[in-house]
Amino acid sequence: MRHVYEDRFAEIEPLLNRVEKPSRYIDHEWGTLAKPDAAYRVCLIYPDVYEVGLPNQGIAILYNNLNKAEGISCERGYIPWVDMADEMRAAGVPLLSLEGAAPVAAFDVVGFHIPHELAATNYLEALDLADIPLMAQERANDDPLVVAGGPSVYNPEPLHAFFDAFLVGEGEDLIVEFCERHRELKVAGLTRTELLRELAKIPGVYVPSLYELVHDEASTRWGHTVPQAGEDVPEVIYKRVAADFGATDPVPQSVVPYAQLVHDRLSVEVLRGCARGCRFCQAGITYRPVRERSADQVVSAVVHGLEKTGYDEVSLTSLSTTDHSCVKEILSRLNRRLADTGISVSIPSQRLDSFGVEMALEVAGEKKGGLTFAPEAGSQRMRDIINKNVTEEDLDRAVRAAFQAGWRRCKLYFMMGLPGERDEDIVAIAHLADHVVEVAREVVSPEQRGGIGVSISVAVFIPKAWTPFQWCAQLDDAEVKRRQQLLLASVKSRAVRVHYHDAETSLIEAVLSRGGRDLAPVILGAWQRGQRFDAWTEQFELSRWLEAAAACDIDLRQAVQEPFPLDAHLPWEHVSPGVSRGFLEREYRRALEGKTTHDCTRDTCTGCGVCPTLDARNVLVGERL
Amino acid sequence: MEPTLFKLRVRYVKRGRLRYLGHLEVAHTIERVVRRAGLPYAVTQGFSPHMRVAFSSALPVGTCSESEWYDLVLTEYVPAHQALQRLVAATPADLAPVEAAYVDIRAKALTAYLTRAVYRIDLSLAAGLAIPASAIEGALERIRERGSIAYLRGKKTKQLDVARTLKSFRVASAPCGALQLVLDTRQDNDGSMRPEILLGALDAELAAQYLPDVAPRPLETGISSFACFASCSIVRVEQTPEADEA
């Protein structure tokens, strides 16, 4: 070990007076579960600051399950904000875990969450602060195993050099199996390579060092990844699925923070997966199949979770909560239970129809701030291409119902740069926003019309691995800027506000989402040039990335603007969420033809392949509306 | 008809690592404590209902206390010792409640009632310095005579009215070059003593005398490093009403 496990809080304490938000670093929160005397230790790290990372439900689940396991203690870590990181380096204090204030390098396993592509440089920032070699191949036998998993694990290749192993899919059972096996192997005194070879036998575990890159006529510029000759490892690592979602703990969350967080509330995951099949959406593929908790389980979980934590808000989370077959019953039962307590219920997003507004009304009470909808595209043609099964009439009815019910402000999310997009589709976004204002003016009384506000937020489409659009290029940033101007010029109503995303961070997100192993040195170079916290606009500097890429002879713009042939062997195809390639190809072709595909939780199977491949199935607790 | 309400007044401590919590973080935590304790708390009426709980004046980040207070309005009577027990069980140890008693529902708000605070400051002198308690008393006296201390809060210059907010002080020597200051202070709408600012001024005053080579620095909020003191810990030991109100 480069560091021993010991409490070093006394060394960071003098720094607390000099940094913003010292409560990020003090631990001692209500509900921590780590076991100081356990012989085997895991530190789970969220690659951002405390207040962004603490609410993460994935980490809460793994933390809970690991600490329930005999003899294993799990602690948490976050990335110190730049002020604290610099102070720690100057004072010679390594990255510490929260619960034990012990050096992260002294743990048996260090596990990183992969929330999205823009966390890439933060893994290196954390490893460097922790005094753990950045490159997996440079780690010694007594360094911790550095592993990663999470929603953005489905193209791990750009990160392959930094992690000893990736844990693919739902981690409920996998993380415990992995750690228990690792503990056995450690006791047996295996070398690091032997040990990883054994761990690679666990389904869902991808050990990148046992694979190699090949370039052939079928591959893209990035090549593709195959088992090294002589290694007995699977050609494709399929994601793990929790054996029985309904049987998992519905309230894994236990730690109640002091600091005020981005999402400061109890979260209960009411369902997992979404089968609506929006063709740009990665989560819509990678979280399949769809599984719901029963209404009874949700209601009792909320009541129990609130008693345990003391929160004054509960969010019923999932990719599409209003799709839950019993959402109406759940909300009305919760409203009765929580009346006069000052505790509120929230749902993350609204379905774009009058049912969605009805459900929004259930949770809004007297307070009607803004209502958020995601039509994603302005024209029906474009919505058919992306398989957003929402019609003009649905939209009209939803906003009409919302303004009639008392809302005065609404926010609409769109994307720009989608495959097949034309100028008329951009103009249609503006028309749609103007139309919403007209509808609002029809139903809102004249004296209240001044309060009407419609804000539209337009992101840049980023093609993601394992979606029907994985072969598509990203629109170049000059063209994105032109279309943004076109949109601005097309909006007529003064009640409409337009927000759009920064094309520069989208470029990095796009290159990491579809790139290959050759990007690892680019990430390293960007970090060496000072890049960290890419997801924070004020910390992001594109020039560092461009320079790092140039040093590796990679032109990032050229890379993202390159479509892949439909028959290409893609860089990520060995790490699979279980969807069949045939399904994605079919969906891509249907997109080009403007044909929509239905939702298998409301109609017949669409043949995505996830259920047979993963030996799983949709589990609904009632009929979906 | 107005329902019968009960006002429970609770004293709690702030110590250990939790002294780094800000006032809002503490307030937030205590609301969660009350819900975890399952006490029948009252909720405000109106647009955005929230728990009826009010706190004594804010304690600077980094300062410990043996005497922080909150008033919690309950809709049902719960014997005070029982309520206290439930609160203790639901509170992190370093914010532990230590006493609870009912007061009149119309009792003055804590911030208006507790206008006096006593601070105890334990200081150790920087290596090589020997400053007698009497010299520290003299320095404090000179600061008080000057009336006010200018300091920075962010980019704004503020004045700490020492003449009004420092009622009295005591300095005692402890073993090994340690010193103990006890400040009797006033805190109300017109301003409160900020012990860390007074300490900064004291440090500058002593440095001018004992460490003439050290350049004076502007005073800022938050605990900064000192020239004459190797360490310091500040504790609010008591918050009380004015003698005629007690």
Image (cartoon, rainbow, N blue to C red):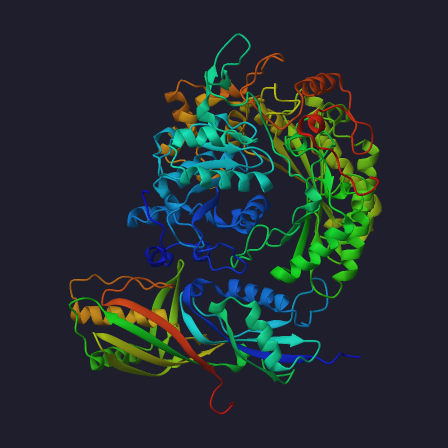
Q: Quick one: A242 or B153, which is closer to the camera? A: A242
Q: Quick one: A79 or B36, which is closer to the camera? A: B36
Residue name at image x 50 percent, y 66 percent:
B23
Q: A185 above or below B43?
A: above
Q: A439 above or below A549?
A: below
Q: B68 above or below A130?
A: below
Q: Quadrant of the N terminus of chain A?
A: top left
Q: B100 above or below A576?
A: below
Relative to B63, A148 lies left or right: right
In the picture, residue B44 is in which quadrant? bottom right
In the picture, residue A619 is in which quadrant? top right
Q: Quadrant of the C terminus of chain A?
A: top right
Q: Position of residue A623 (x, y in %)?
A: 84, 40
Q: Position of residue A545 (x, y in %)?
A: 43, 28
In this view, the residue farthest toward the front is: A188
Q: Position of residue A123 (x, y in %)?
A: 44, 37
Q: How many marks?
A: 0
